[in-house]
Image (tube, helix red, strand yellow):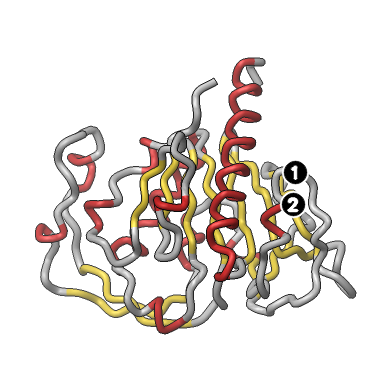
Amino acid sequence: MREPNLLIISNRFEETNLEEDMKAEFVKWDWPLKKLWTFSDYHVVIIDFSFNKDEFKGINQEIYDSLGGRLLEVIEGLIVIVICGYPKEKFNIYVPRSRPDESRYLHSQTTCYDPEDLSKEVVKEERDSYTFLQGVPIGIYDRLTPEPSRIYEKKIKSPFKEYFNLTDIAHLTIQYSPPPSDISVEPISRTSGVGKDRYCVGALIEIEKGNLILLPGYNKLKKNEVLLSLIKISKELYRKQQKLKERGQ
């Protein structure tokens, strides 16, 4: 079985940390939008939000603004891992008042979306750190609670056990019960104490034939180990997905 095509959007993870036989494409948050073409070229996309508020101000807002639409492609079988590494804070983002017809770019392999085509007029909008999840039609954004959890289970089954041994403070908790009628929300690590049967700090969400995984932030001093653990998670989920396809499920 072939290895999955992997896209990593992160300011901390680097290609030099990978094994020689592992191929992945890296995009940093302050790069031009044209560096982030389409998620449909990949099997797994890792979106690393594990940075502080000051670092958030330096990201390319066009990249952030494009995530909601790109995440809709998860229903086509994509595996998306989102690292929720900072609180659900309010901020202002400047977005174009009008955009060109993006449909003409969708099937082109050589022409990239050009920000210069945008109108120079922009609109200031107040959002919070995870507004892009509103683009996923499962109501998961409304289930995010911006209350950090310092105590949660770390006895996790494969393939997430290694990652949770490297986690930091969980800045968000996720309500998983009761789940939407047509969506599977499986807790990866439940919170402790009151409400532990309804809230978690990591969740695996099955959307048709794709997966959206929400994980807490990691120990920045262990970023090399974290990246390797994320790659193992990606490979295992991808192989599981391929086996289901072979069985016609």
Residue type, mark 2 in image: Lys
Task: Provide residue 42's location: percent of width, then percent of height.
Answer: 41, 37
- Mark 2 lies on a secondary structure that is helix
Please give the name of the residue rendered at 23% of the width and 42% of the height, measured from the top-left corner: 103
- Mark 1 lies on a secondary structure that is loop
* Furthest-right residue in this view: 193
- In this figure, what is the number of numbered marks? 2
Residue 38 is labelled as none
Residue beneath disc 1: 158
Please give the name of the residue rendered at 62% of the width and 37% of the height, measured from the top-left corner: 237
Tell me where residue 57 sits by quadrant.
bottom left
Classify mark 2: residues with Cα within 10 Å, few (<14), some (14-19) or many (20+). some
Residue beneath disc 2: 161
Quadrant in which the C terminus is drawn = top right
Please give the name of the residue rendered at 48% of the width and 73% of the height, measured from the top-left corner: 51
Q: Is residue 63 found left or right of 76 in the rendered image?
A: left
- Foreground of the two, 245 or 177: 245
- Foreground of the two, 118 or 201: 201
Mark 2 vs mark 1, CA separation in Å: 5 Å
* Furthest-top residue in this view: 247
Callouts 2 and 1 close, C-beta under 8 Å: yes
Task: Provide residue 135's location: percent of width, then percent of height.
Answer: 47, 56
Task: Provide residue 65's location: percent of width, then percent of height.
Answer: 34, 63
Task: Provide residue 41's location: percent of width, then percent of height.
Answer: 36, 36
Residue type, mark 1 in image: Ser
